[in-house]
Structure formats: structure tokens, C-alpha cells
Image: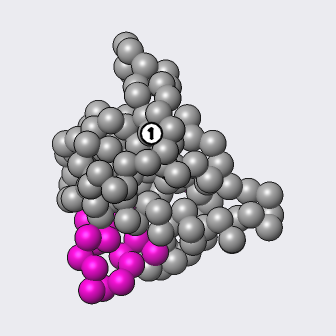
């Protein structure tokens, strides 16, 4: 599961703490993360992990950003990724690539501040009790047809 959060990041440890959650809850474990400009990309091995971390992160950043008139949108999508060290022999960097990463990024771009959008593929992995919100369609770059997304409540 790939979750992309667009937010200004100033401290890596803060995001890790929010993403990792309670150490007794393995479902919130971040498998990998990457920072790029004002975005955080988090990769999870389980759908429940992405959902739990996404909601915890939204709750954690709202009180920090809100007083400054800022907000973060979150996009969640599921799919295979290729991850590892890329580059030349002299310079290598960790990255995650693939359609799932691009789709999550595009869905995040369609999210309003404070909004969490999940694609149908992401929603399908969630327990029924967590599938509440309003459905809508978003047009995203790289997809011929609009994507159906759930705006999580």
C-alpha cells in the first residue's frame, strides 16, 4: 500500500513517530518513506497499516498546521512498487517507483486540505467498519478514465 501525504516537513523524526504509532500496534508500521520537497511518501505492506497511519497523521498535523492557515491533503492507493537504490556507481539514492506511487501522488493532488482520498483499490482492503465517507470521481494525469475515490470521514 502506498500513501502519499503532501505537507511541509521539518523534522523526519516527527513523521516517523506518527507513522510508526504505538509499537504494540504492528498494523501502523511504515515499511519505507521518502521525503521530497513538501511531500512525504510512505509505503506500507498492509492496507490497515496505511489507513491507521493516515488517520493518525491527519489528526497529528491538523493542530500544527491549522493555526497558520495551512492544511495537508492525503492520497492513498494500493499497488506494486519497485524500491531500492538507484543511480550511478558513484551516487545512489533510495527511491520507490511505479504506477502505484504515481497514482497515489495524483490522488493526493486532488485532495483538499485536511481531506483523505482513498482509491477503490485501497478501500477494498479496509475492514467494512472503516469504509465510510463520500464517493466521488477525480480525473488524474496518466489515467484514461476518472478514478473513483472515497473521501474518508
Q: Is residue 145 above or below residue 48?
A: above
Secondary structure beneath label 1: strand
Task: Using the image as rendered, state which of residue 129 and residue 50 is in the foreground.
Answer: 129
> Residue 11's quadrant in the figure?
bottom right
In the displayed structure image, the side of residue 112 where residue 105 appears, left or right = left
- Please name the residue that numbered disc 1 is placed on: 150
Instruction: Answer whether residue 93 is visible to the viewer in this image.
Output: no
Residue 118 image offset from top left, x and y in percent = 41, 43
- Which residue is painted at 19% across and 42% down in the image? 80
What residue is shown at x 37% (from left), y 55% (from top)? 130
Magenta segment = 18-37
Considering every residue shown, the one lying at the far front of the view is: 129
Q: Position of residue 6 (x, y in %)?
A: 55, 51
In the visual, does 74 lie left or right of 64?
left
**Magenta stretch contains residue 134:** no
Residue 150 or residue 93, whichever sits in front: 150
- Asked whether residue 144 appears in the rendered view, the answer is yes
Return the residue found at the far top.
144
Residue 120 image point, x, y percent: 32, 35
Q: Would you say 18 lies left or right of 113 here?
A: left
Amino acid at each position: 500500500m502506498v500513501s502519499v501525504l503532501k505537507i511541509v516537513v521539518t523534522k523526519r523524526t516527527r513523521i516517523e513517530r506518527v507513522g510508526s504509532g504505538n509499537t504494540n500496534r504492528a498494523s501502523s508500521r511504515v515499511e519505507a518513506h521518502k521525503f521530497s520537497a513538501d511531500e512525504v511518501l510512505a509505503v506500507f505492506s498492509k492496507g490497515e497499516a496505511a489507513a491507521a497511519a493516515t488517520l493518525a497523521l491527519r489528526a497529528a498535523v491538523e493542530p500544527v498546521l491549522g493555526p497558520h492557515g495551512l492544511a495537508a491533503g492525503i492520497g492513498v492507493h494500493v499497488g506494486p512498487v519497485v524500491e531500492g537504490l538507484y543511480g550511478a556507481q558513484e551516487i545512489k539514492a533510495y527511491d520507490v517507483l511505479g504506477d502505484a506511487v504515481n497514482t497515489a501522488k495524483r490522488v493526493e493532488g486532488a485532495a483538499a486540505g485536511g481531506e483523505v482520498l482513498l482509491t477503490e483499490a485501497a478501500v477494498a482492503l479496509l475492514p467494512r467498519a472503516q469504509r465510510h465517507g463520500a464517493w466521488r470521481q477525480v480525473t488524474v494525469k496518466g489515467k484514461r478514465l476518472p478514478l473513483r475515490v472515497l473521501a474518508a470521514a
